[in-house]
Amino acid sequence: MRLKITGNVEEYAVIEPQRVRLIGPVGKPLESKITIVPKDRYPFTVTGIRMRSGRYVSAELREKAGGGYEVTVVNRRTTTGIYYDTVILTTDSAIRQELMISVFGKII
């Protein structure tokens, strides 16, 4: 059986960048900023932030003047290696209660 679904997908928010890559040498501060702006048609408030693991990376949320949010993701790994994690934002949206942003780190 084959199922084909077509149609338009409407964004509920602009998330830029959609994924985080933290790549650099040991000892160098590495961070990335993510901007989240809800679409007017689907307003929501971010009510919480957490990391899936949080072992090698941390994240901080702040509201931006003029609307939207900024998440700062910071590498905490102090040895060489690769890691993956996920920033999880909790919202009050009926459409999407959690927003997930993938994080990749490579410390060389």
Image: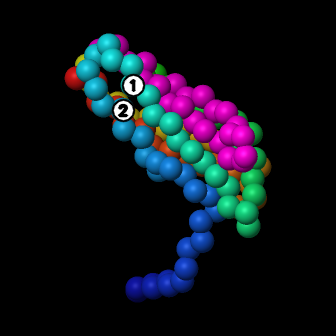
State the residue lying farthest toward the front.
Answer: 66
The answer to whether residue 55 is above or below residue 9 is above
Q: Residue placed at 58% from the left, 36% from the top?
A: 71
Helix, strand or loop at disc 2?
Answer: strand
State the residue lying farthest toward the left.
Answer: 108
The quadrant holding residue 28 is: top left
Q: Residue placed at 46% from the left, 48% from the top?
A: 17
- Nearer to me, 35 or 103: 35
Q: Which residue is mark 1?
A: 30
The answer to whether residue 26 is above or below residue 42 is above
* Magenta residue check for 67: yes
The quadrant holding residue 94 is: bottom right
- Nearer to me, 20 or 69: 69
* First of labels 1, 2 by sequence position: 2
Q: Residues within 10 Å of mark 2 (few under 14, many from 20)?
A: some
The answer to whether residue 11 is above or below residue 104 is below
Separation (CA) of disc 1 from disc 2 = 6 Å
Side (left or right) of 105 relative to 47: left
Is the stretch drawn in magenta largely helix, strand or loop?
strand
Helix, strand or loop at disc 1?
Answer: loop
Residue 19: assigned label: none
* Amino acid type assigned to the residue bearing label 2 in the image: Leu
The answer to whether residue 66 is above or below residue 24 is below
Q: Is residue 99 visible?
A: yes
Residue 22: assigned label: 2
Quarter of the image for the C terminus: give it.
Answer: top left
* Magenta residue check for 77: yes
Q: Is residue 52 visible?
A: no
* Amino acid type assigned to the residue bearing label 1 in the image: Leu
| Residue range highlighted in magenta | 57-79
